[in-house]
Image (tube, rainbow, N blue to C red):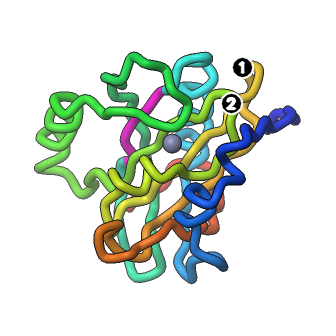
Amino acid sequence: MVDATIYEPERFRSAAYLAVLERGDSALSCRFADKAWSDMQHIAAQGYPDEICGLLVGTTGAEGWLVTEVRQVANLNEERAADRFQLDPAGYQKIDSELRASEVEIIGVFHSHPDCPAKPSPTDLNSAWEGFVYPIVSVCDGKVAEVLCWVTTDDAAAGGKFQKLPHSVERGTMTP
Ligand SMILES: [Zn+2]
């Protein structure tokens, strides 16, 4: 990972932003195939200064998630705000149907935070689904500064928050 300064705009220290974070890390974890891990960072850096988003493809098990592949999907939000994105539903449907006969499925959504930390925003929480993994790639001055993975403890409407999910990267080809 590139050593870059991580910018933190004031709003990330506001009560509204801090309120979406749960203390402590999740007991589960997320493993990435190394190509999926590097592809995700490459997509995020290439998209800078725009915010990009995409899907995680892989499997879910008792210990957490295994990401075998990532796919970029268009971000329909053109306001370029660093804390909100809108995943193209047609792109989602296309990938979902492609995977229907396979052993893998869509297990999460990643997005970038240009010149912002890899911490989720209140908007991110409102659009998050329980059971999905949400990696956030902080891209500062065009370089990947940090990647953190998040999961929700429950639906936002039920008082759920984001909890940090430990991750690891594995070399070579992984089979689910
Ligand atoms: Zn975000």
Residue contact between numbered discs 2 and 1, judged by CB atoms under 8 Å: yes
Q: Which residue is depicted at the point 63% across and 28% down?
A: 114
Determine whether, in the image, residue 168 is placed left or right of residue 79: right
Magenta range is 52-56
Q: Kindly indicate the quadrant of the structure image that contains residue 169.
A: bottom right
Q: Give the x, y percent position of residue 28.
A: 53, 78
Q: Kindly indicate the quadrant of the structure image that contains residue 39.
A: top right
Q: In front: 91, or 22?
A: 22
Q: Which mark is residue 122?
A: none
Determine whether, in the image, residue 10 is placed left or right of residue 118: right
SS at badge 1: loop
**Mark 1 Cα within 10 Å, few/some/many (few <14, many 20+)?**
some
Determine whether, in the image, residue 12 is placed left or right of residue 44: right
Amino acid found under the numbered disc labelled 2 = Val
Quarter the C terminus occupies: bottom left
Q: In front: 22, or 133?
A: 22
Q: Give the x, y percent position of residue 96.
A: 18, 43
Amino acid found under the numbered disc labelled 1 = Gly
Q: Which residue is depicted at the point 76% across and 40% down?
A: 8
> Which residue position is annotated with label 1?
142
Question: In whole angstroms, how far apart are the C-alphas of marks 2 and 1?
Answer: 6 Å
Is 175 located above or below residue 154 in the figure? above
Is 156 magenta? The answer is no
SS at badge 2: strand
Is 55 magenta? The answer is yes
Q: Which residue is depicted at the point 71% across and 53% down?
A: 13
Determine whether, in the image, residue 21 is placed left or right of residue 89: right
> Which residue position is annotated with label 2?
139
Quarter the N terminus occupies: top right
